[in-house]
Each structure stands twice: as C-alpha cells, then as structure tokens.
Amino acid sequence: MLRGISPLLSPDLLALLSRMGHGDELVLADAHFPAESFNARVLRADGIRIAPLIDAILPLWVLDPYVADPIVMMAPVEGDALDAAVVASYRAAIERHEPGAPATRFLPRFDFYDRTRSAFAVVLTGETAKYGNIILKKGVIPVA
C-alpha cells in the first residue's frame, strides 16, 4: 500500500502506467471484451469498475491535450443502446481530474478493435456495462 495512491491500482498496473509515454493509449475494457485477441499486453483488474479506475488513474497522469480525441468509447451496434449513466459516470470521473476535457469520441465496434491493436495495453476490468470500453491517451506529464 502506498500513501496517496489508490488501492485500486495494483503494483502491476502502476508499473504499466509508469512505462507509458505521451501519446500511448490505454484501453480500459469491460469484462466482456476479447482483450487477448487484440493486444499482447493485457492486465487484469477483475472486480473493479471502470469509473473508479479512471478516478484512480487520472491523478497520476494527464490526457493528451494535443489531439482531438484523447477519450474514445465504443459506439453501440445498430439496434443496441449505450447506457447514458455509464457514459456520465466516466465523464464525471474524467472531469474531476481534467476539467474541460474534450468530448468523448465514439468509434464503431470494429474501429475500436483496430485502435485496441495499437494501444499500449488493455486493462480487463470487472465492468459489466455493455459497451463500457474506453480508451485514454496519455499526455506529457508537466514538471512541477
């Protein structure tokens, strides 16, 4: 346990976040996501929902301010619906740490999968919300 670090962040996840450079993307995937089919670097965070995980990660690094879409979610397939409460909970967590962050971009399912292939890593969570997947792009950490 470390002081000032969320207990939701395992030592492996902390190491992964530390190894990421600016412009690297992190996929926070729901429990249904076929993570190992799309990325070789998969870390498990079973039982942890994505909104609290965003709340734990964003105090440690910033979203990339130099791109139009540092926040990307999977769009629902035609005929399905995205749970607005899930999107709102993610946005609330993001806004707590990055007020005025760019709008969330929604990518069709297979485009999201393509982007996952080039992501730095996938964290497979305990999120059970359908289409609960999100990609966060890391920015440059300012020197204090």
Image (cartoon, helix red, strand yellow):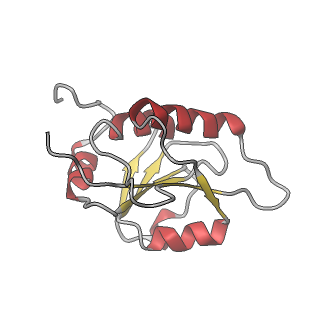
**126 sits left or right of 41 in the view:** right
Whether residue 109 is visible? yes
Which of the 4 quarters of the picture holds residue 107? bottom right
Front residue of this view, candidates 116 and 123: 116
Whether residue 49 is visible? no
Q: Is residue 130 above or below residue 99?
A: below
At 50% from the left and 42% from the top, the residue drawn is 126
Q: Is residue 103 above or below residue 78?
A: above
Front residue of this view, candidates 112 and 23: 23
Furthest residue to the right?
79
Furthest residue to the top?
3
User: Where residue 56 appears, x then y in whole percent?
Assistant: 35, 35
User: Where residue 28 appears, x then y in whole percent?
Assistant: 46, 51
Which of the 4 quarters of the picture holds residue 98? top left
Front residue of this view, candidates 130 and 138: 138
Front residue of this view, candidates 136 and 95: 95
User: Where residue 91 appears, x then y in whole percent?
Assistant: 55, 37
Total marks shown come to 0
At 14% from the left and 39% from the top, the residue drawn is 144
**115 sits left or right of 144 in the view:** right
Furthest residue to the left?
144
At 56% from the left and 58% from the top, the residue drawn is 33
User: Where residue 47 appears, x then y in whole percent?
Assistant: 46, 38
**50 sits left or right of 6 in the view:** right
At 52% from the left and 48% from the top, the residue drawn is 102
Quarter in which the N terminus is drawn: top left
